[in-house]
């Protein structure tokens, strides 16, 4: 009899246990309170959007003109810089040597031009004049000898061969005089004009090559394109930077005045009131609102990149970006911080 009751008892126990688990699991658990109370609109009617804090100048991504090894990082994060201040330097030893070579070539070209411009040398003129006088005296001597031999020839004292030799000597002396006079005139005339043009062109070419080398050297120093504050540095001394770089080497921005870039869903664009102030709240602090002043609208709708995690949010949503200026307590905010922004629609209704 005990065996006949064992199976029903076990079945009843399992059925009771299963019913207990079903009833327990069917009971709804009480909702958990959020760790941080989400911000609520302070206006009766509003448009909500997600905003990102950015500098007045937006984020300026700093790059380099050429690839190379970083020799020196001249700034630190948080440092304020002026326009033109050096930010980092690429290894410049090779180009410094190139500049030195170009300077030497320029000095050589200038010296060659100066040499041509100062011709003739004053020291060479007396010697050239003496050669001319010497040639003139030689011609007179040959003429005198030739005249005497002419008389002897008439008296049949010398042979015809001696007379011919003396006549040739006179002709040679006259030719040497002409050559000496021409060399003296060439010396006194100075440098030839085309030679001066070639020398001046060589100087201009050397100057241009030096400027090119100096420009290449200057491009190794990356300077600040505007006044601002260094927000981020992604490069260290000794690292190799490529051209183009996959990431920005530094981020620069003017944070004296902060802006908030607000994404407005395309479904809310028809209701968006231009030039209307807004109010923002920091994530985790819903008690201290931040007043925002309208600046401008970027007239181009783009795909939404900053997702809030809402269950009603669609990934394929396009947004209109509106720029606001932080009008109160900007020191509480940092660049890149995400805010909950509410745009007041009640003023538009009252005006309507």
Image: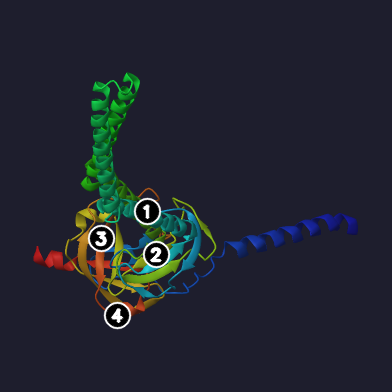
Residue ID at (38%, 68%): 86
The Cα atoms of the two marked residues, 2 and 3, are separated by: 22 Å
- Which dot marks residue 303? none
Q: Earlier in the sequence, mark 3 or mark 1?
A: 1
Residue ID at (44%, 61%): 249
Can residue 347 be seen in this snapshot?
A: yes
Q: Secondary structure at mark 4?
A: loop
Going by the image, does 218 lie left or right of 116? right
Q: Residues within 10 Å of mark 3 (few under 14, many from 20)?
A: some
Q: Secondary structure at mark 2?
A: strand
User: Disc 3 marks which residue?
Assistant: 322
User: Disc 4 marks which residue?
Assistant: 329
Q: What x and y, as percent, mark residue 252?
A: 36, 66
The Cα atoms of the two marked residues, 2 and 1, are separated by: 45 Å
Q: Secondary structure at mark 1?
A: helix
The Cα atoms of the two marked residues, 2 and 4, are separated by: 23 Å
Q: Earlier in the sequence, mark 3 or mark 4?
A: 3
User: Disc 1 marks which residue?
Assistant: 108
Q: Earlier in the sequence, mark 4 or mark 1?
A: 1
User: Disc 2 marks which residue?
Assistant: 251
Q: Earlier in the sequence, mark 2 or mark 1?
A: 1
């Amino acid at each position: 009899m005990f065996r006949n009751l064992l199976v029903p008892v076990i079945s009843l126990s399992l059925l009771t246990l299963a019913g207990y688990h079903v009833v327990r699991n069917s009971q709804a658990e009480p909702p958990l309170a959020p760790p941080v109370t989400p911000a609520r609109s302070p206006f009766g009617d509003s448009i909500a959007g997600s905003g990102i804090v950015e500098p007045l100048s937006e984020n300026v991504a700093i790059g380099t003109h050429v690839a190379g090894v970083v020799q020196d990082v001249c700034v630190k994060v948080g440092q304020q810089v002026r326009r033109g201040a050096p930010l980092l330097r690429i290894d410049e030893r090779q180009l410094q040597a190139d500049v030195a070579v170009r300077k030497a070539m320029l000095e050589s070209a200038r010296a060659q031009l100066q040499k041509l411009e100062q011709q003739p040398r004053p020291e060479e003129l007396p010697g050239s004049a003496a050669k001319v006088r010497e040639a003139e005296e030689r011609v007179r001597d040959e003429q005198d000898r030739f005249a005497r031999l002419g008389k002897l020839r008439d008296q049949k004292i010398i042979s015809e061969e001696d007379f011919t030799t003396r006549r040739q000597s006179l002709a040679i002396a006259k030719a040497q005089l002409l050559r000496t006079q021409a060399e003296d005139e060439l010396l006194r005339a100075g440098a030839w004009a085309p030679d001066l043009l070639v020398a001046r062109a060589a100087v201009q070419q050397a100057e241009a090559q030096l400027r090119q080398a100096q420009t290449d050297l200057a491009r190794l120093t990356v300077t600040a394109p505007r006044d601002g504050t260094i927000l981020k540095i992604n490069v260290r001394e000794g690292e190799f930077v490529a051209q183009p770089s996959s990431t920005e080497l530094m981020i620069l921005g003017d944070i004296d005045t902060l802006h908030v870039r607000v994404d407005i869903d395309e479904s809310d664009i028809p209701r968006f009131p231009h030039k209307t102030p807004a109010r923002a709240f920091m994530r985790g602090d819903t008690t201290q609102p931040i007043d925002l002043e309208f600046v401008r609208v970027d007239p181009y709708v783009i795909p939404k990149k900053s997702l809030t995690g809402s269950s009603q949010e669609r990934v394929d949503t396009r947004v209109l970006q509106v720029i606001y200026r932080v009008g109160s307590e900007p020191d509480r905010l940092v660049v890149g911080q995400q805010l909950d922004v509410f745009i007041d629609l009640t003023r538009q209704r009252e005006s309507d």
